[in-house]
Amino acid sequence: MYLEIKKKIEKAKIYTKPFPHIIIKNLLSKSTLEKLNKVLPNYNEVDKKNVIFQSSSETKKTIMPDSKIFKDLLKKKIFLEVNNNLKKIKPLILKKFKEEILINVNSKFINSKIKYNMNFALMKKGYLKSPHLDRRDHLISGIYYPSTEINKGGNLQMYKPIKRNKIFDVFPSKKNLRIIKNYKVKNNLCIFFLNVPWAYHAVSKYAGTKDRKYFYIDYDFNLESSSSTTENRKKGFNSDFFWNIPVSVISGRRKNIFFKE
């Protein structure tokens, strides 16, 4: 599995607009994907007590690595193998983004130890997310989609600020952004992006009747309050000392809207 993924990462083109990212189609072999999808639960099979809801709409369940469900999934050979390989490819992904990292990361943290984190999410019909920035301790974020309904919305959208600001808003107004990329999500698609202070992304409304299942892959700066735990994941981390350009929550109103979607 590792060698197959390695080749695909090495061949992947880096797109720098609107922010650095790579697209990998068919990350896993067909047989591996089939085995993985057999062990992944559905939205309604996962109890509310064992997940995080990041919005009041409850259209997405996030299963953190310290939860019982995630630990039970790790007992499944195929899930453990995929998780281990996503961790193992960390040096390849860091190398892929090396030039952009040198430009955008604060020089004090260029040689920081980078940690691997992953959580599993389930999304149902009606889910959407407005443009936003991820937690600032994520150096590189990845999303891997083993299962989704195709051509039913839920596109991953990437935006560019119309004006380059001295401080970037975590929850910006759409009138200040222009959409540059609009990726249709398909089974076995994987996207990695550098979490620069203008890495605005969104998800259009998902209309599929089939659950979308996906992994959030993060290569993180080392923090005591790591976002790999359920307690810390519930808290936003917007301190920007890792990056050369600051971000801030400028509008509390837009933040509240975002967490109600």
Image (cartoon, rainbow, N blue to C red):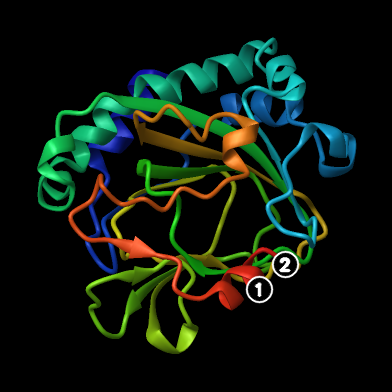
Against 245, residue 12 (above or below) is: above
Residue 143 in the image, given as x and y percentages of width and height: 49, 45
Is 209 left or right of 239, judged from the image as shown?
right
Residue 67 in the image, given as x and y percentages of width and height: 71, 24
Q: Say the numbered circle drawn on residue 123.
A: none
Is 49 left or right of 220, judged from the image as shown?
right
Is 247 left or right of 35, judged from the image as shown?
left
Q: Residue at x 66, y 60 (%)?
A: 150
On-image quarter of the C terminus: bottom right
On-image quarter of the N terminus: top left
Residue 132 in the image, given as x and y percentages of width and height: 48, 65
Specify the amino acid type for callout 1. Answer: Ile
Q: Which residue is mark 2?
A: 260
SS category of the residue bearing label 1: helix
Q: Residue at x 38, y 83 (%)?
A: 178
Against 77, residue 27 (above or below) is: below
| Quadrant in which residue 169 is drawn | bottom left
SS category of the residue bearing label 2: loop
Q: Which residue is mark 1?
A: 257
Q: Is residue 241 among the parts visible in the rendering?
A: yes
Does the residue at mark 2 contact the one at mark 1 (Cβ under 8 Å)? yes
Assess disc 1: are there few (<14), some (14-19) or many (≥20) residues with their C-alpha within 10 Å of its C-alpha: some
Q: Residue at x 30, y 60 (%)?
A: 197
Q: Is residue 199 among the parts visible in the rendering?
A: no
